[in-house]
Amino acid sequence: MFWKMKIIFMGTPEFSVHALEEIIKAGHEVVAVYSQPPRPSGRGQALNNSAVHEAAIKHNIPVFTPKTLKNPEAQEQFAGHKADLAVVVAYGLLLPKPILEACRCINIHASLLPRWRGAAPLQRAIMAGDKKTGITIMEMDEGLDTGDMLLVKGVQITPDMTFGHLHDELSGMGAKLVVEAISKIDNGGLVGIKQSGEATYAAKIIKEEAKIDWSLPGKQIILNIRAFNPYPGAYFEYKGEKIKIFEADFERDAGRGESGRLIDDKFTIACRDGKIIPVLVQRQGKKTMPLTELLRGFKVEPGTIVS
């Protein structure tokens, strides 16, 4: 028999929205949504709600945006919802012990734990050249993604898969898997398994990492381009302008010349062990375009160095 659970949903970015929608569609009562506070963005730096916050407004669900959950007031407020379960996905705050004790808390994490605990598991998996990743539904504890695993599902990372592709696939997969987990919790049939194996940490991506290091092997540069597509976009600087690369090819070439040097007038750039041939690019302040379109009005000087 179906039991409609009272659920607190805790999430912030677009990745989390699919799970909220699936939980609502499954018939559960989302009594509260917790998300990060509105942040300034855009040219005017106006305050904007998170993607999850906007989704909650659409469904007329009360939204709470505390800056911390460590104070007694926030903890009393959380417990006051009298929820059966909290579902957490990319929320942005660790849950202190009083929150974890207020109701059962489970998390949707976008990796095959214990590999890539932390903030940026999708991008780190692509950057590392991993062949597989997935979703882990886990029991939450006070550690960073250290809880017992409840459900696990894997997916292959194909050679052309970008962060954007992986994000969308795992967002949908996580949403369906957490609804399955809730159903099994309802029926008392979900038992956690301890994480085993070597743990790795997926540190938050900082914008500076997206600047292309031409001294790296070409294979790594291509991995990084895929990991930063669509955000924040791998880039280099030429003639004082930032140019992003969203897709490129690599050719091994022992005689390629100094790393970062323009080999020809087609924006082919030397790296440690060959050359990078941009395919899809974006000039500063412009739309994304094929390289051929950029070259129609942009003069490239072979022999110069890009930074």
Image (cartoon, rainbow, N blue to C red):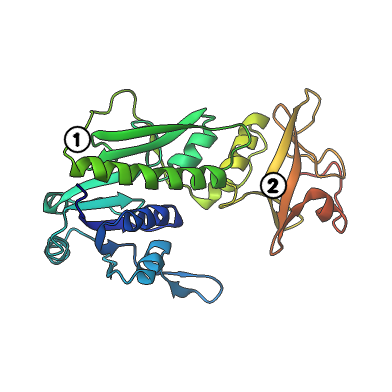
Along the viewing direction, whichever of 288 and 245 lies nearer the viewer? 288
Drawn side of residue 23 relative to residue 283, left or right: left
Q: Position of residue 190 (x, y in %)?
A: 21, 35
Q: Residue at x 69, y 64 (%)?
A: 285
Q: Quadrant of residue 149?
A: top left
Query: For the residue marked with disc 2, what is the amino acid?
Result: Ser
- Looking at the image, which residue is at 43% across and 42% down? 173
Q: Residues within 10 Å of mark 2 (few under 14, many from 20)?
A: some
In this figure, which residue is indicated by the disc labeled 2? 307
Q: Is residue 140 above or below residue 198?
A: below
| Residue highlighted by disc 1 | 189
| Labels 2, 1: front one | 1
Task: Give the left or right position of residue 139, taking residue 164 as reference.
Answer: left
Amino acid type at circle 1 is: Gly
Is residue 235 visible in the rendered image? The answer is yes
Residue drawn at x 75%, y 44% is 279
Q: Residues within 10 Å of mark 1 (few under 14, many from 20)?
A: few
Numbered badge on residue 220: none
Residue 263 falls left or right of residue 229: right
Q: Nearer the viewer, residue 107 or 275?
A: 107
Q: Position of residue 22 (x, y in %)?
A: 37, 53
198 vs 285: above or below: above
Query: Which residue is located at x 86 percent, y 40 percent?
Result: 264
x, y percentage for residue 119? Answer: 39, 46
Give the mark nearer the N terminus: 2 vs 1: 1
Q: Estimate the x, y position of residue 88 in percent, counting from the top left.
A: 29, 51
